[in-house]
Structure formats: structure tokens, C-alpha cells
Image (cartoon, rainbow, N blue to C red):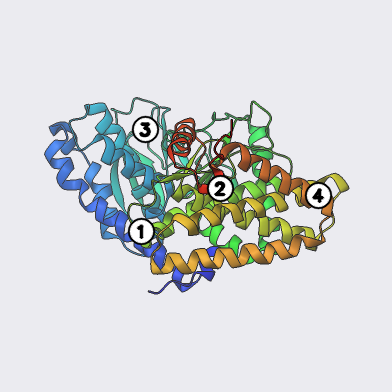
């Protein structure tokens, strides 16, 4: 399929291209899961092979349909496969096998319950004694160690644990910021891979407030940018609260091996939360797109250059992801300013944010086109971002001239400190020293040579 760059620069909505890229992800997950059973039989301890751990895997591979494919795109499936590749290609402890295969059962149990199928599984609890039905907000409390699985019987939409005479009638559930998007600060498989910033463990009232503001941010987004909202709510599965000990406006992170999860700190400002969600979501969207088309030709992604956002050098791939995210943030804030009125302080802050982001995006794009080699789609994509940055630059010309000058001066000051002259290179000490040595050794031109002394 020939991708239309316009649908990927901004939120294009649930289009045929969006679904096609999603199917590519599903195909990759199913291919990886097919390799699990032979590896399990070859490497797992014999005691595990006699259990019903493989029943869940076989059920997931056998049952097709939208519900199964949606589970394949769950961030916990991403992370499950990441752990599998990292730890189970070699000999692992028996307790680790129990834990890993127990997690996989959560996907199968969730699918069987939603379909009304019958299935018997060995349900292994996570280290906190919980068994999550991934893809749903529900979980089970299973006291015991991860190496002590319990028999789980699913039949006609009901669930029974061996040793209990009646089905489980009411399951605990996670709070949702939107249908299908849970707030999770406890699930082991969900939070284990979060390594940037500190995880926040919330009380019930704090968790409810965290979800409430995010719900408001997503509701606003549905009105202001329906295409972006449609994509985001289709891809996102979990929002994880982070600590903000330095009291920054917001801290956030997302991970290439947990596509569909966004981690962010709490704020009572829905517009700030929308900005944060858009920024991190765009990284997730690009990480999924780059599997289909890398945009940058091989050998380009790892090269490092000056960053208009940070004091340290960034890879060319990072500049691409940053430009895409901040372009979307600037567009959303610009649209919000044109549609609604805000208190003066918030209005000025948004104008500062928009103008600064546009200038930084143009700086990053300048480096990309100077030094990057692109695929055919990549050329169209980067050119399209240039055009959109130009449209936004035109739209901010009604901002106060003093405000625009202040932001331009701030960007220029950052460049003087951290960029090597007018190039896209980062001003590292080694590079500055090298340039100085080359300049010293370069012969001067005739008009730079001093005239002979007459003394």
C-alpha cells in the first residue's frame, strides 16, 4: 500500500491505511507467538510442560477476529514479547517460566470470557498476587507465589477458580479514563518496563482525579481534533501515573516496547494533559509507522546532531520523532487558541508554547533535510512537515511581536550555546577542539597574510 503522508503527519483518523499498518503489527505478533511453543518445549522444565500453560497460547493462535487482534496490539503483549526475547532464549529459572507463561494466560482468559468460549488454564499470579485479564479493566486476586498456578475454568462467560464451589461473580476493576483505556499504577507487566521518572502509587481519590482530568482532555480532543482522537483512542490501552518531584509543568515518557501505554504526571489542567498525551502518542504512532516504512535510509538513524530542545546531542531519528510530536502539539494548541478564550496568563503561556515549538520544529527539520537520506515515503513525509510548519508559522504572526521576538531570541541563544556555528552538529568539546586545530593549520588567503615589514 502506498502511504499518504498527510494521514500520518497529523491525525488522519481510522482510515484504511491506519488499519493496514495495525494489521502489520498483528502479523508480527502472531509470527512471534508461533515460535513460543517449540522454544517452550525445548527449554522449559518438564514440570511446566505437563501443565496447561500451552492451552492459552494455542487458543490465542487458533481464535481469529477483531477481539484477538486487538489483544495482539496490547502494550502488555509488546512487553511480554520483549521479555521473552531478552530472557527466554537461554536457560531461565523455573519461577521465571511460571511468571512469564502465567502472564500470557491473562490474554487468553480475557478473550475466552469476551467470546463466551470454554477454556481451562493454569492461572499464574504476578508477584503482587494478581491475575490481569489484559484488554479489559478486570483482574483477579490470586494469593500465592507466581510458581503456584491455580486452575482457572472459563465457561459461558463465567469464571471459576479450582477449589471454589461457585463462579467468581464480581471482579475488581481498574478505573478507565475512556472506554478501553485504563489507569494502571499496579499491574506488574504494565509498570515493570517504566524506567524513566518515578512511578506514582496513588490513593483511590488521587487515581480518580488523575483519570478525571485525562477524561476531560480526551473529550476536548474529540471536539477539537476528531481524527487525532479517533487514532489515539484506538491505539491507547493504558495511562500510567508518574511522580513529578521537581514540580515541572509535566513529566512524561513512552516506550517502543510498550506501544499503547503513555506515562505522565498529574495536572489539574486538561489542556496541559492533552498536550502531554499528544506528544507521547505521536512517538507511539511513529514507532508503529516506522515498522512499515523506516523514513530514514539505513545507517542514518544513529547519527547524532544538535537538538533544539535539549542540551545534549540527539540521534537523527530522535529529531524526526521530536519534530513530528511538537508539530502536532503546536497545531493543537494553535487550534485551541483560535476556538476558545482563556484567562490572560494561560493565553500568553499557550502563545509562548506554540511559537517556541514551531521555531524548534523548523530547526529540527532543517537538520533533517541537510543531513538525512530518506525513503520515497520519507521524502514526502518530511516535505509535508515543512509545509505544515510553514502554515503554523503564518498563523502565529498575529501574536504580539515582542512575544515572538522573545521566543526567537531564546531559540537563537540555545543554538549559540549548543550548535556548532550554523551547522546541524552538536557543539561538543572534542568537535570544537578539532575545528580549532583545523582552522589553525589552514593556510590563510593572500589578503589575510600581513604585509612584509619595512623595518
Q: Please name the residue that numbered disc 2 is placed on.
A: 447
Q: Where is residue 212 in the image (x, y as percent from the top left)?
A: 68, 45
Identify the image quadrant of the N terminus. Answer: bottom left
Which is more N-terminal, label 4 or label 1? 1
Q: Where is residue 393 in the image (x, y as percent from the top left)?
A: 70, 61
- Location of residue 16 (image quadrant): bottom left
Question: Measuring 62% from the left and 65% from the top, which residue is drawn there?
Answer: 388
* Residue nearest the viewer, comparing 368 with 84: 368
The residues bearing labels 1 and 3 have C-alpha atoms spaced at a distance of 44 Å
- Return the residue found at the far front: 455
SS state under label 3: loop
Image height check: is 291 above or below 391? above
Q: Please name the residue that numbered disc 4 is placed on.
A: 403
Question: Measuring 38% from the left and 32% from the top, which residue is drawn there?
Answer: 126
Q: Residues within 10 Å of mark 1 (few under 14, many from 20)?
A: some
Which label was assigned to residue 24? Answer: none
* Of marks 4 and 2, the one in the foreground: 2
Q: Please name the residue that numbered disc 3 is placed on.
A: 125
- Location of residue 377 (image quadrant): bottom left
Image height check: is 142 above or below 27? above
- One can see residue 30 in this view: yes
The residues bearing labels 3 and 4 have C-alpha atoms spaced at a distance of 56 Å
* Of marks 3 and 4, the one in the foreground: 4
Q: Please name the residue that numbered disc 1 is placed on.
A: 297
Amino acid at each position: 500500500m502506498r502511504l499518504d503522508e498527510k494521514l500520518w503527519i497529523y491525525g488522519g483518523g481510522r482510515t484504511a491505511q491506519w488499519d493496514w499498518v495495525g494489521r502489520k503489527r498483528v502479523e508480527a505478533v502472531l509470527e512471534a507467538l508461533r515460535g513460543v511453543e517449540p522454544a517452550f518445549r525445548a527449554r522449559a522444565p518438564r514440570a511446566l510442560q505437563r501443565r496447561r500453560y500451552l492451552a492459552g497460547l494455542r487458543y490465542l493462535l487458533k481464535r481469529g477476529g477483531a477481539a484477538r487482534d486487538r489483544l495482539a496490539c496490547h502494550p502488555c503483549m509488546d512487553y511480554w514479547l520483549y521479555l521473552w526475547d531478552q530472557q527466554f532464549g537461554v536457560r531461565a529459572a523455573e519461577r521465571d517460566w511460571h511468571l512469564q507463561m502465567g502472564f500470557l494466560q491473562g490474554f487468553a482468559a480475557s478473550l475466552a470470557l469476551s467470546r463466551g468460549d470454554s477454556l481451562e488454564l493454569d492461572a499464574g499470579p504476578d508477584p503482587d498476587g494478581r491475575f490481569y485479564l489484559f484488554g479489559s479493566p478486570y483482574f483477579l486476586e490470586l494469593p500465592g507465589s507466581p510458581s503456584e498456578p491455580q486452575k482457572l475454568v472459563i465457561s459461558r462467560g463465567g469464571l471459576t477458580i479450582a477449589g471454589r464451589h461457585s463462579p467468581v461473580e464480581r471482579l475488581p476493576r481498574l478505573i478507565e479514563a475512556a472506554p478501553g483505556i485504563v489507569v494502571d499504577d499496579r499491574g506488574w507487566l504494565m509498570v515493570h518496563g517504566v524506567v524513566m521518572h518515578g512511578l506514582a502509587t496513588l490513593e483511590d481519590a488521587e487515581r480518580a482525579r488523575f483519570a478525571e482530568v485525562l477524561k476531560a482532555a480526551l473529550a476536548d480532543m474529540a471536539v477539537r481534533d476528531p481524527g487525532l482522537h479517533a487514532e489515539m483512542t484506538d491505539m491507547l490501552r493504558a495511562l500510567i501515573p508518574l511522580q513529578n518531584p521537581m514540580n515541572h509543568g509535566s513529566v512524561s515518557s513512552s516506550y517502543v516496547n510498550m506501544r499503547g501505554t503513555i506515562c505522565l504526571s498529574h495536572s489539574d489542567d486538561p489542556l496541559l494533559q492533552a498536550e502531554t498525551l499528544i506528544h507521547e502518542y505521536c512517538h507511539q504512532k511513529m514507532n508503529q509507522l516506522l515498522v512499515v516504512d523506516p523514513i530514514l535510509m539505513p545507517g542514518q538513524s544513529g547519527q547524532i546532531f544538535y537538538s533544539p530542545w535539549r542540551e545534549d546531542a540527539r540521534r537523527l531519528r530522535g529529531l524526526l520523532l521530536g519534530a513530528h510530536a511538537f508539530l502536532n502539539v503546536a497545531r493543537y494548541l494553535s487550534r485551541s487558541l483560535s476556538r476558545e478564550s482563556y484567562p490572560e496568563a494561560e493565553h500568553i503561556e499557550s502563545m509562548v508554547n506554540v511559537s517556541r515549538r514551531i521555531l524548534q520544529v523548523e530547526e529540527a527539520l532543517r537538520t533533517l533535510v541537510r543531513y538525512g537520506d530518506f525513503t520515497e515515503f520519507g521524502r514526502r513525509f518530511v516535505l509535508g512537515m515543512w509545509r505544515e510548519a510553514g502554515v503554523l508559522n503564518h498563523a502565529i504572526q498575529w501574536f504580539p511581536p515582542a512575544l515572538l521576538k522573545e521566543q526567537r531570541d531564546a531559540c537563537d541563544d540555545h543554538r549559540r550555546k549548543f550548535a556548532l556555528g550554523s551547522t546541524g552538529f552538536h557543539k561538543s568539546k572534542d568537535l570544537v577542539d578539532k575545528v580549532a586545530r583545523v582552522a589553525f593549520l589552514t593556510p590563510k588567503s593572500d589578503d589575510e597574510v600581513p604585509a612584509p615589514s619595512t623595518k
